[in-house]
Structures are given as structure tokens and as C-alpha cells.
Image (cartoon, coloured by chain):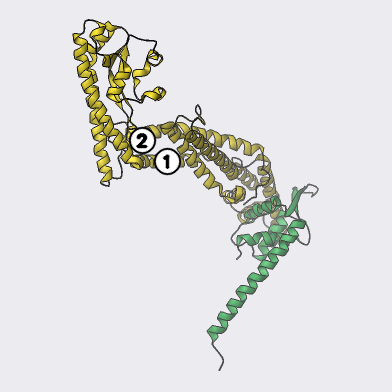
Chain colours: A yellow, B green
Amino acid sequence: MSDLIAWYTVELRSRLAPHLPLAEVNTIVLEAESHLKESVAVLVTEQQLTEELAASTAINSFGRPERVAMTHLGQNVLHPFGINPGWLIYGGAAVAILTWVIHWEWLRGFFDNFGETWQNGFAGVVGTLAVIAFGIGCYSDRKKHGFRILAAGAALSIGIIFTFSFLIVGANTNQQGLSRLRLSRDVSNVKANVVILDRLDAYIRQGAVAFARAKTTEDIPLRFRDPKVAQNELVLYDLPDQAAARHDIDSEPGFQTGSIRKMFLTPSDFVYAMVDGRVYGLQSEIEFSHAVLWWRRHESDALAAIAKERANMTLLLGAANQARSGRLFFFNPAVFGEALCWLIVFMPILFIIDAGVFILIKRNRSWPGWVKA
Amino acid sequence: MAFRSDINALILAALQTEPLHGYQIVRRIRETGGAGKLSEGQIYPFLHKLEAAGLVSAEWQTDTGGAPRRVYQISEAGTKELEKQREHWRKFVSGVGSILMVSNSTAEGPNV
């Protein structure tokens, strides 16, 4: 075999091998070799060319190896259900990643709570279908898609920043934001939170005085001993639904079962007011002496935490006003940063699926019922 | 010049009379000028596509005395497809021809 033809077959094989099953690559290369040899024989016989010149002429007519390889690869693309596989790859990757991100950001986790709520179930089904569509697209395109997955990830990263910054109305100083789609509801929640925080502030100040003066348990007013009384006063959560408590004062099991009769509410260093209406700000002590000590040491920290949370609520209300005045984006890395992290976490899953499907392609020539483009 | 979709019809037509190996098919199509800008090597993917669609069948011929050849033969489905393509082509030629002829007579104007 001429050196030129040998070079040509090696070049052609190297361009096809990463993308097509071995048997198919062998057929294409052998057929090309057969064609070139036939062509050389004809040129030598009919035009009296030297073998080297004939090989060069035959290769010129046959076409550059990269061009021939591209045509073969182009013909090998499958169109499942008549859809271009590129759409399935990009669309499947985008929907799968977004579903995962939303699942982890706003729902209750993808794998451990699948189907627990209808939103979880719906998002899980959509995400699973998107992954299947992505896999079918990879299979149909019959090559690796690392670049496409990276491109989809980059586009989603930018998209997530703008989407979250549009949908979540908030301030840079706050980790949470208001939903632009339910601005009125969230604003009323925030206003209610401010009222609760004011009450909590007064409650903490009065409690500190009461515990400082108290000599015995009986000296402590009932509102600092009975969580139900405190709950009613502060309107922290609905009594009939203690399992979904809006306040962590029910964190002591005895509060719910009634087995603990002697208990004291104490201030917390961490106060959280959520835009969905939940406020966290009290905890409890069982021992009287511990409770007295806790009130003395943590009153100021609790008041500072309340003031900080009240300031956050004020900033959120200010942001809501800006949104109503027409401001479109509220760029807050604390809000979209986590979504970006999840996106980066989930991207490798798509790479693994892509690699797995490619191994399947190498083993299995084609699936029945799929028409070549 | 030819549309790429016509290559399939040309391949089927080349195979209508007798089975041919790849080199012969490509030469015939090149001689008709039907391959357009496609190189010889770029015609093979169309052959493989027709094979995958069941319009032609292929098998290796090793007793050639030289390099093994892959010989292609048109199938029954391929013959039917060729007839369909011929009918399309007749309609196309007839439609385009009628427009071109009308344009030609309009340009010349009426004979007075």
C-alpha cells in the first residue's frame, strides 16, 4: 500500500474513531482504502501516472480526510421522534439543572424527599424526564458533548444571576428576599414580622427585669414560664398546629407533651424573621438558676439581634418600594450564589451521563425504530 | 449542479441495472456531474445512509484478486423509492420548465 494511502487511512480513522462504533469505523476506512487502491490502479493503467502521483491524485479526488469524516459523522446523527438531538441536549441539560437547583433551593431536596409534596413530585418527574431527554440527545448525536454541557452551564449561570436577581427582591445585606411574583403577600408578612419583633423587644426587656428581681420560681410571671401564654402574647405561631410551629420555643419536647411543668423562656442570641412569616427568637431553660443567668448574660445580645433583624425587614420593605417603582434587578450574591453552587455541583452528573451514553453508543450500533436523518 | 438530496436518487439509479462496488458507483455519479461539489469520499456516507434505510444492501467481496470491495445492490424498497424519486423529478422538471417557457415567451412579446 502506498505511504500516502496508509497516511490517509490513519488520518480518517483518527477522526472517526472517537465518535463512531469500531465496526462502522472499520467499514468506512476499509472502503476508503479499497476505493483509493482502485483509483490508483486505474490512474496508473489509463493515464500512465507513477504510483505516487496516482495516489496523490486519487486522494485529492476522494477529499480531505477531515471533510470526508465530517460528512460521515453528519450522516450518523439520529433524529429521535423527528427532533434535532441538539435541542434535546441543550433543553434537557437546562431543564434538568434548573429543576435540581429549584428543588434544592425552594423545595425539600431532590432525592431524599421525592414526591413528599406535589411540587417535589412534579419537579422530580420533570427533572427525570429532562435527564432522559438529555441522554437520548447524547445518544442520537453519537459523540461526546463536553463543550455543549459547559456552554449550557455557562449560559445557565448567567441566566440564573439575572433570573434570581429579577425574581428575588432584596438587599445586599440580607440573605433572603421577597418574591416579585407575590410581592404584596411577602410585604404584609414582613410588616407583620416588624410588629412581632417590636413585641419581642419589649418582651425581652421586661423579662430581663423580671428575672433580675425574681428570688424564686413563683416570682416569674406566667408569660415567661408558659410557652402558650407567650405564644398568644407574641402571636408567634398557631397553637393548633404546633408541629409546624413558627417559633422554636416549642423545641423542648416537654412543651408539646405537657410533661415538663417547670420551665422558663429565655432570650436567644439569634433572631430570624423570615419573609414567609416565621420568626425565631426565644429558647428555654428548665433550671431556674440557669434561666436567671441566661437572661442576665444574653439580654443585650438578643436585643441587638432583634434590632439587626428589624433593620433587615426595613431594607426589604425599601427594596419592595423600589421594585414597585420599576427597579428590575436586585443583584445579591447571597441569593443567587447558592443557586450557582448547586449548578456547579450538578453539572458533573450530566458529564457522567454523557460519558455513559457514549460507552453505550460504542457497544450498540443503533436502536430500533429510530430513523437516520 | 445537484441538490444533495438528489445524490440518493442518483445512487439508486446507478444500481438499478447491476450491483456495483463503491468505486464504480462514485465514478458513475461523478461522470454525470451529479455530485456537485462533493468529493468522491463524501458520496460514501450517502451510500451508508441508503443501506441503513434498507434501500440498498451491501456485502464484502474478497475474491477480487486485489483489495476487498464492498458491493452494493438495490433492494425492492430501493426500486420503489427510485420510482418515487423519478416521479418527483418529472414533476419538478415539468413545473420549472413551464415557468421558464412562459417567462421566455413573455420576454419575447407577442408576434404582431
Q: Residue A45: which quarter of the image?
A: bottom right
Q: Residue B99: which quarter of the image?
A: bottom right
Q: Nearer the viewer, residue A152 or A115?
A: A115
Residue name at image x 28 percent, y 7 percent? A288
Residue farthest toward the bottom in the current orientation of the protein: B112
Chain containing the residue with disc 2: A
Residue farthest toward the right in the current orientation of the protein: B63
**Where is mark 2, residue-wise?**
A336
Q: Nearer the viewer, residue B71 or A179?
A: A179
Q: Locate residue B98, reporting x and y percent.
A: 61, 77
Residue name at image x 49 percent, y 35 percent? A118
Q: Does residue B79 appear to the left or right of A6 in the view shown?
A: right
Q: Locate residue B41, reporting x and y percent.
A: 64, 53
From the viewer's perspective, is residue A344 above or below residue B96?
above
User: The disc labelled 2 sits on which kind of residue?
Assistant: Phe
Q: Locate residue A103, reporting x and y percent.
A: 45, 33
Chain containing the residue with disc 1: A
Label 1 Cα neighbours within 10 Å, binned few <14 / some 14-19 / many ≥20: many
**Where is mark 1, residue-wise?**
A156
- The mark closer to the camera, 1 or 2, is 2
Whether tag 1 and tag 2 are in contact, CB under 8 A, the answer is: no
Q: Nearer the viewer, residue A174 or B79?
A: A174
Q: Nearer the viewer, residue A163 or B101?
A: A163
Q: Locate residue A313, reporting x and y percent.
A: 26, 32
